[in-house]
Image (tube, rainbow, N blue to C red):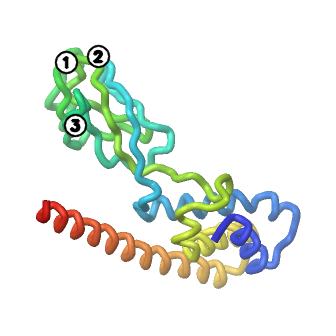
Amino acid sequence: MNYTALTAAITSFLENEGVSFAANKDLFIQLGERRIHMALELPSARKNASSNLVDGEEYLQLPSDVIAVLDIAIVTANVHTHLRKKEEGFIREAYPIVTSTATPLYYSVFDHNTLLIGPTPDSGYGVEITYHGVPNSIVTDTTTWVGDNCERALLYASLAEAYRFMKGDPDMMNHYEDAFQEEIIKMNALVAKKAHDNDMFDTMFSRQT
């Protein structure tokens, strides 16, 4: 389902061609996309970003589109040394003196935009951040992985947001929400199966080589 088909379906389902409704249609879609991205770890949402730690600085800024951090590794001469995720309290207790620096071993999510690194870096190490991020929207790209592979979830999520804007009948609102949740359950099962199949393929390939 592309952007044109999606907007036409929203109009057809809700039979609303009002000026205010039309002006907010892109917002309904983007809110729906956001719900899908928060509910599923989709292949299209897996991203990598390069950054650098700062000598003597315990924090690392994250990319602006991060939903969840999956991994962080120090990269030295193309060798990846993965940091272990810990709670903030563990890092604070293990390394109470912020000015005491060494090669980092751990990270913790400090807030939505920042990681806490422990111990405090003793050099400006290059790092690679693997994360679950916000994919491009069908509003701007016209076609997306979500539109092609999760079209029913995207439609029902958009309808739920649009119908909420219309302050529609509670029973119909529940219908759209229930339909969306059903599609999310199906997509979670599909994503899990694909991940399992990929793991099986990797295992078989490694044995053959």
Q: Is label 1 or label 3 in front? A: 3
**SS of the residue at dot 2?**
loop
Under mark 3, the amino acid is: His
Pointer 2 and pointer 1: residues touching (CB < 8 Å)? Answer: yes
Distance in Å between CA atoms under marks 2 and 3:
19 Å
Q: Is label 2 or label 3 in front? A: 3
Quadrant of the frame with the N terminus = bottom right
Residue under pointer 2: 55
Instruction: Say which label, 2 or 1, has the lower sequence index.
Output: 2
Under mark 1, the amino acid is: Thr
Distance in Å between CA atoms under marks 2 and 1:
8 Å
Under mark 2, the amino acid is: Asp
Residue under pointer 1: 101
Q: Is residue 178 left or right of residue 60?
A: right
Residue under pointer 3: 80
Neighbourhood count class around disc 3 (C-alpha, 10 Å): few under 14, some 14–19, many 20 upward: some
Instruction: Say which label, 2 or 3, has the lower sequence index.
Output: 2
Which of the 4 quarters of the picture holds residue 194? bottom left
